[in-house]
Image (spheres, grey):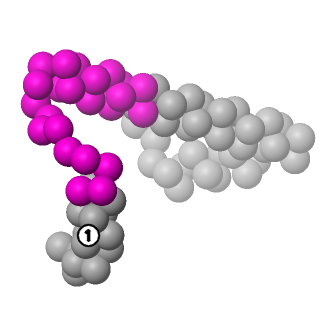
């Protein structure tokens, strides 16, 4: 398996135009992977919602909880 340094060294040996193409390809694949993960998370959240795993809350309660969480130190 290649290390990151080996991959970078190989990529830097490509002509400039191919380096730009490689960057665009990697960005597009990264974006697609992230979209896939977001979609999977959304599907799981919907399944949990339909399974009754969430409590009903008013919008005011949710907003208050979000505001409160902004003032809590991160763990």
Q: Quadrant of residue 10?
A: top right
- The quadrant of the picture occupied by the C terminus is bottom left
Q: Which one is nearer the viewer's eye here, 10 or 26?
A: 26
Nearest the viewer among 29 and 11 is 29
Main SS, magenta residues: helix
Q: Position of residue 56 (x, y in %)?
A: 17, 38
Question: Which residue is rendered at x = 32% and y = 49% of the image?
Answer: 59
Query: Foreground: 49 or 28?
Result: 49
The image quarter in which residue 40 lies: top left
Q: For the N terminus, which image quadrant?
A: top left
Coordinates of residue 49 in the picture (x, y in percent) = 20, 26
Q: Is residue 11 above or below residue 64?
A: above
Q: Which residue is mark 1?
A: 69
Residue in the image at 87% along x and 47% along y: 16
Whether residue 17 is visible, yes or no, is yes
Q: Is residue 14 visible?
A: no
Q: Residue at x 42, y 33 (%)?
A: 38
Label 1 CA crowd tier, 10 Å (few <14, some 14–19, many 20+):
few
Total labels drawn: 1
Q: Is residue 49 left or right of residue 8?
A: left
Determine the image quadrant of residue 65: bottom left
Confirm whether the magenta stretch covers residue 73.
no
Q: Is residue 51 magenta?
A: yes
- Left or right: 24 with respect to 71? right
Q: Residue at x 28, y 23 (%)?
A: 46
What range is drawn magenta here?
A: 38-61
């Amino acid at each position: 398996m290649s290390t990151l340094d080996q991959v970078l060294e190989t990529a830097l040996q490509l002509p400039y135009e191919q380096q730009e193409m490689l960057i665009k390809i990697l960005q597009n694949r990264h974006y697609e992977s992230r979209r896939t993960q977001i979609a999977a998370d959304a599907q799981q959240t919907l399944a949990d919602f339909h399974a009754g795993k969430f409590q009903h809350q008013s919008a005011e309660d949710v907003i208050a909880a979000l505001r409160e969480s902004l003032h809590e130190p991160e763990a």
